[in-house]
Structure formats: C-alpha cells, structure tokens
Image: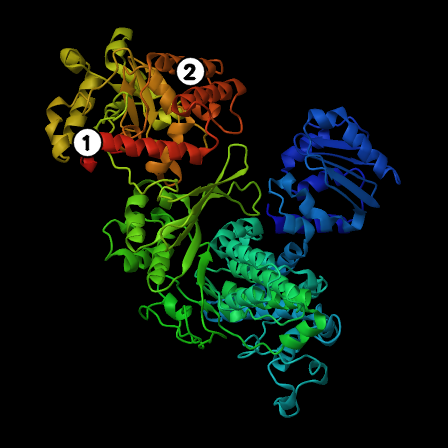
Amino acid sequence: MNAVEIEAAISELALQPFDRQEFPFAFLAAFGNKDTTLKRLHAGNSNASDLPGGVLQRNHIHLAVCAPGTVGATLAALRDSPATTKAKARFILATDGQTLEAEDLAGGETIACAYSDFPGHFGFFLPLAGISTIKEIKDNPIDVKATGRLNKLYVELLSNNPDWATSERRHGMNHFMARLIFCFFAEDTDIFNGNGLFTQTVEQMSERDGANTHEVLEAIFRAMNIEPAERANAQPRLPNWADGFPYVNGGLFSGSTGVPRFTRMARTYLLHAGELNWRQINPDIFGSMIQAVADDEERGALGMHYTSVPNIMKVLNPLFLDDLRAQLAEAGENERKLLNLRKRMARIRVFDPACGSGNFLVIAYKQMREIEAKINRHRGEPHFGSEIPLTNFRGIELRNFPAEIARLALIIAEFQCDVLYRGQKEALAAFLPLDAQNWIICGNALRLDWLSVCPPTGTGAKLVADDLFGAPLNYTEIDFENDGGETYICGNPPYLGSRWQTDEQKADLQAIFAKRTRNWKSLDYVAGWFIKATDYGTKTQASTAFVSTNSICQGMQVTILWPLIFASDHEIAFAHTSFKWKNLASHNAGVTVAIVGVGKGKGKVRHLFSLADDGSVVVKETGNINAYLVAGGNVEVEKITIPFGPQAEMTFGNTPIDGGHLLLSVDEVQTLGLSSAQLQCFVRKIYGSSEFIRGLLRFCLWIEDKYLNEALSIPAIHQRIESVRAVRIKGGTTAKDIAKRSHQFQRMNVGEKHTIVVPSVSSEGREYLPVGLLDNRSVVSNAAFALYDAPLWNMALIASRLHLIWIATVCGRLETRYRYSNTLGWNTFPVPLLTEQNKADLTRCAEDILLAREVHFPATIADLYDPDKMPENLRHVHEHNDEVLERIYIGRRFRNDSERLEKLFDLYVKMIAAKSRPRMSAKEDKA
C-alpha cells in the first residue's frame, strides 16, 4: 500500500461505529496486513499480548482497546509490558473509542487526540507499512488527503466521460484539474472574497444529482477570465452568483472553459475535496504526488512520487544555496553588501530540464525567498517586495499535466512566501491577476534548445527546437524580468538503463551522442541530460547538479560518458556517493542513486559527500573528484590479462558449446542407466551462478580422452556426443574447430585439489559477493569464474567488502545486479604486498567463513546472504575478515566505502605507474 491508500483506509475506519473487538484488526488491515496475518492474530496463534484486549504484532505494534477513561493508564501498561519489549514493538496504542493515545518507542514521539481525529495522524504510523516516516507528511497530512480525494474525483469523471480520456482531450482534462486545485487553494486563502466561496457556490447552485455541475463550473471559470470592467457586456451574460469571483487569467482560465459532466458521486467527491483546508497545502509535496493522478500508468503508484526536502537539498545546497548563505553571513549588517546580495539573487536563474511537478524549482524558490527575507530584515526593510521573479525558475517537462502542476505549485509558493514575509494584505494585493504563463515548457528536453528556453543573459526567451520533431510550436515567448546573472541547472531526470529504453528514447540519445562516440547505446537515459547541460555550460557560466543512477559512474559507462564531459573543460564540482532515493511506496527500498555536480573552474575545492558505515554523513574536501566519484586524479580502469598484484590467476569457466547435450538434470542422469563406477567416471556436478547461489543440482558429462571408447560404448552417452557434434558442425568457427572432440567442453579445466568459484552475476542486495570452495570433482561452467588450486586466502579477498565495492564500481551492473569480470575486476584489484603472516591470517578467515556456512547446512548461499536473514555467526566472521584485510591496507578499519575506494584507486594508480600492463582484446573476457 502507499500513503494515499493508507490515509483513505484510516479515514474510513474512523467514520465507522467503534467496534471494541474488531478495531485492532481493522487498524492493522489499514496498513496493508494480509488477511492470513490478521486471522492468525485474531485466533490468538501469533498474538503474544499480555494485556486484556491487547493485540501484539511482533516488531511493529502493541495496541489495546480499554474501558472508557483508562486510555492513559492502558498506554502506560503497554509501555511497561514485558511482551512489548520481548516482541521489539516500535509503537504502542491505546483507545477507548473516544480518545486515542500512541507512542513511537523508537523516537519517543507521542500523540493524543479525539478518536475521530486520529486519521490526521496517519503519517505517525506509516512505518507500520514499511514506509520511512516523512516529517512533512507527519506534520501536514493535508497533501496526502487532497491527493486521495482528487484521485477519486478524476477516476469517477473519466469513467463517465470516456471522450475526456482520449489523447485529444486529455490535456483539457488535466487543465481542468489544475483549475480546481487553484480554486480550492484560493477560497481558503482569501484570494477569493469570502471563506469557502468556490465550494459553497458549487454546492448551492448545482443539482444534487450532479446534472448541471459542469454548467456551474463553466460559469465560474469564465468569470475568472473576464476583467471586471468587461463583465457587464459579456456574452452570454454571467450569472450574478458568478460575478463574485475575481479576474485571474494568467493563462489558467483562458481558452476553453469546457468541463466534463458530473455524476452524483463526482459532485460528492468535489465537495469532499473542498472541505479540506487548502491553506495548509505544501506545493513541493502535493505537486509531486498529484502528478500521478493524471497518468494511467502511474495511478497505481499514487503518492509514491514525493521526494523529501532533505534529498532535494542535497542537490541545491552545494550547487548554490550554501554559497548564498555564506555571503549572507559574511555581509552581516553591512547594508551595501546585503543590497549587492539581493541584486545578485534577483538575477539568478534556476533551470530544471526534467522538472516533473516542479518540486526542485519550488524548493529553490522558497529557500531563496527565505534568504531574501533575512536580507530585508537586516536592512530594516521587512515588508520590502520580493525582487525574485517566478520567471527566473524555468523548467521542461515531457507531460502536460505535471507541467501545469509545476506552474501552479510555483504560483502557490509565491503567494505563501508573500504572506509569510510581507503579510496577508500585501500578498493579496500583489497576487491577482496572474500574468506569467509558460515558464514551464512542455516538451522533450533532449530535443529542445536549452539556451532558448533559459538564455543565460538578456530579458527575452524564445523556444527553438533542435529540429521540429516533437517540438511544441504554440508556446508564448516569456520574457525574463531582469537581465541574467548565474544559471543553475538541477533536477532528477529519468534514469532508464539501455535495456529499458523505448525506441524514441534511444533515438533521443542517438541524436545527442552519435557524432561523439560509437558506444552510446550502453548509456543510461540520464546521460543525455548531462551532455545537454555540458553543452549549455560551454556557452555560459552555468553549473549543474543532477540526481542520477550511480551506474553512470561505474563500469563501462565511465569510459564512454565522462571523457566527453571532461573534454569540454568541465569537472565534477561536488558529489554525493551512492545512497537510496526512497519514496512513499510501502516496503520500497528505493533506487540507488548518486548526485553529481558539474561545472567549470579549475583549482577550486571540491566536496565529496558520503555515508559512513554508521549512517552519518562524511564530507571530504579534495582537489579533484574523478568519474568514479572518488577523491583523486582522473583515471579509467582498463582490462588486463593477468593480475598485477599477488592474487592467483582467475579464468573463465568451462564453455560447453553443446546445444545442451553435455548438461544433465537429475532425472536425465538417471535415464542414462549408468553403474556407480560409470557415474564416477563420466558424470560430475557443474556449477554456474545459479547452481552455486541457489543450490540447484545440475550435472554434466565429463569425459577424459582415455575413457572415450568406454563412453561411446554406452548408447545414451554415444547419442548425446553425436548430438553435440551435429550442433558444432553447424555452428561458428570456434564450434567447428572443436567438433572433432564433441565428447568434451571447449575447455576442460578442473582443480586437482579444489576450485574457488565466483559467480559472474549476483544480486546487488547482498553485503558480500558470493564465493565458495568446490572439490576436485566439481566443474565450473561459463556462468562463473574459477581459481584452480589457488591458495585459500584468495577467497578471503573476494569475500571482502573492499572487493565488492571495487567490483561494483569498475565492473558496473547487469540490469541492477553485480556483473563480475576477471580481467576488469579481479586482475585490477589493488592488493598490497602480503606477508606470509598476512596470508595465513586471511586463510584462517576464509576457513572460518566456510565453517560458519556449514553450521547452517543445507541453507543455500541465497538463504545465508539474504541481508535481512544473515546468521549472526556468519556476519561476525565476515566482519572479522574485513577487519583483518583492511588493517593490512591502512592499519585500521575504513570509515566508509568512499574511503575504501579512495585507497584502492590510490593503489591502482601507483601500480599501473610501476608496471607496464599487457593489453588484451575484449573477446578474452566474455561473461
């Protein structure tokens, strides 16, 4: 479930007659608990509560329904309950159906309210649904409520007006929704005369069955597009009841005033939405959630698009806000310096070329208004009008509804800031009529000329496309109110790896990259925004910061994208290394992202932000940040044929090239009808990535030349060998070359004593790379890598956090999974000179890991390394292995992954400088 669905369920529960027996289970159901879970709790099978009327859900909540007037005492009993402690409950809740009290035991926060009011605190309980608590949602639930009610209205209208759902009329439908949002906000903030004017007018003038609701709304919308002096002569005449609405225009009510037809239910949903207090709406939250209302593909994810303010500030603060605040602090009470800063801010242009519903722009605007207000207070001018125009906040958005919402969100943000910093009277006087229009352009950002949408200097702006394909041609030119100064490009563009891009998106990248590099097809979609920003920066002094998948700073994408950026005299100005960019989806782990700031200006101090192992933020000042987001010189890791450290040689597993005839399932082994001796001679277990990680049982024919005649005497084996021969004869050059020995794999490698196996692809969710030890009869397939008879301390290296971070960084990903490479990841892995004692210590660590796994037999690698279920003894020996290895590198544990990478890249640079590396062709490293 998502936040919007939970709010609706909780609100519905509060409206129902209070049922003492069923309330705990209905409450848990509202947060997405399955029927089977609730049935077990109801039956008492999994309910470990030790209080009368109590229900206890392990790791979540202990709640109890109590006698009237005993809520406080019951909450105290829940807090002191041994069962609460034993079950590690995060929340306690007590209610008598009249009042409700609850406490978050993890943070100590409490709530106490009338029972009917508890839906207003639904954000407090969101962790019960696996949703990270968002402060803005907890403090101001109106945004989620508004989203849910508008969504119901939207769905009801489309179901009864299917013509409005067509591509020809969808824009009109979206524009209608934007008008409604404005009206709801305006009637609660005195923009309209009289409190509740819009909702009350609709309620009074429309029929209960909704039959004429569209006519009432059309009249209201038309009134707001006619100036007062012209209303007396307006044709058709405005109804007297519509004349009380002010002239708004500004593009919001111009054009068609058509409204879809309403049903009784649609009218009810409209009035319910109007009952909310829209004065409290937060445009940077509400806009990003409401954009899903108008998108069929995203409606199922309603409410999931909110990006928290702290995450947005990770982009905006180091990009330019920190500098503005520093200049404010330096100015002190100096009126001249304060005035210069105010003038500087008035000329700053903020540009988001993938703006969605505009939350980056809204946050930037609100932050700048806060700084401006402090300037005015220091200068003794607290009511001075803002010199920061909305037209300085430009955006491009592919879809029209988010573009509409972005414009509206900025308008609302401007009014709220005026009320906050100048007062209600001044804010109202300056608000209407609206005059700025299309500072948010609806179009394909990768096809438009950014310099024309947001020119760095001058007061004019004209929309020009690189070509006419996909370019909107009907936009009004919107002038800037003052000459440009600095331009800051920011946002969260779409990521989309190459496998998920549509033909149109691939064409977008081709148009940008085809003349720059041959390998552009491997790039993520977001790379297009980085290059467009770089091109923009070659003609301006703009700085850029985007949220991006961390994959553009890993693997082969580094060697494709970043040389193009660095060649244009740009450098990485700051970066946040990988972290989870979460949303409001239940149990959503979030996508792993990085934030990369790019600009010109050599010699400046660069800031690299990262998370320490304990979750705290570490900031490192450095002279350079390379494309892997590591403090240090620019470097590109390239494949080499043999390790340049002390580690053993790792080779690719055995490739069958057999059409499947040398490979056997358990059943197929049995159908061969072999004796025990023949099984021992001709059949072996084979391990690829899946077999090793998931414990799948698979076999292969493994026939040495000296036993070929005996093998051919067995009909079932003889038939399989002939089938292999037929496949190879029809195959390519390599297959034909080995057709004469069709009883064998292309290579026949196996350890004499043992083999260390490393899967070629594995899940990114694990904290350690899967690696293991096989006996001398096991075969490694071409879906894994092998170290034959290598000393066991090599396994300790592979099993370390250090090695996982190196692989993730220099090898990149297959989809989202780790993609291992011997030539790129293992051979280049920087390992310092190891003493015999070091090797002995690491050997013991590898043995301890194997023994810890053995305790949990027959658990698979997938079972053991599930991050939520990893056994404590196994975790302990891995942590000890990390400590032993990291002390070899720097004499202590590393603080975080950034420090690990910094040391590894430092060693890598020294090693490649000390040795001449043999080159290789790409075909030697197939995965």
Marks 2 and 1 in Cβ contact (< 8 Å):
no
Q: Quadrant of residue 96?
A: top right
Crowdedness of circle 1 by 10 Å Cα count: few (<14), some, many (20+)?
few
Name the mark on residue 845. 2
Can I make out residue 48 in this image?
A: no
Residue 233 pos. (x, y %): 63, 93
Tag 1: amino acid: Ser
Q: Using a 10 Å C-alpha cutoff, classify the residue at mark 2 as few (fewer than 14 neighbours), some (14 to 19) or many (20 or more).
A: many
Q: Is residue 847 visible?
A: yes
* Residue 250 position (above or below residue 833): below
| Residue identified by numbered label 1 | 916
In the rendered image, the residue lying farthest to the bottom is 233
**Residue in the image at 28% along x and 53% along y:** 567
- Which mark lies nearer to you, 2 or 1? 1
Distance from the alpha carbon under mark 2 to that under mark 1: 33 Å
Q: Amino acid at mark 2?
A: Cys
Give SS at disc 1.
loop
Residue lying furthest top: 677
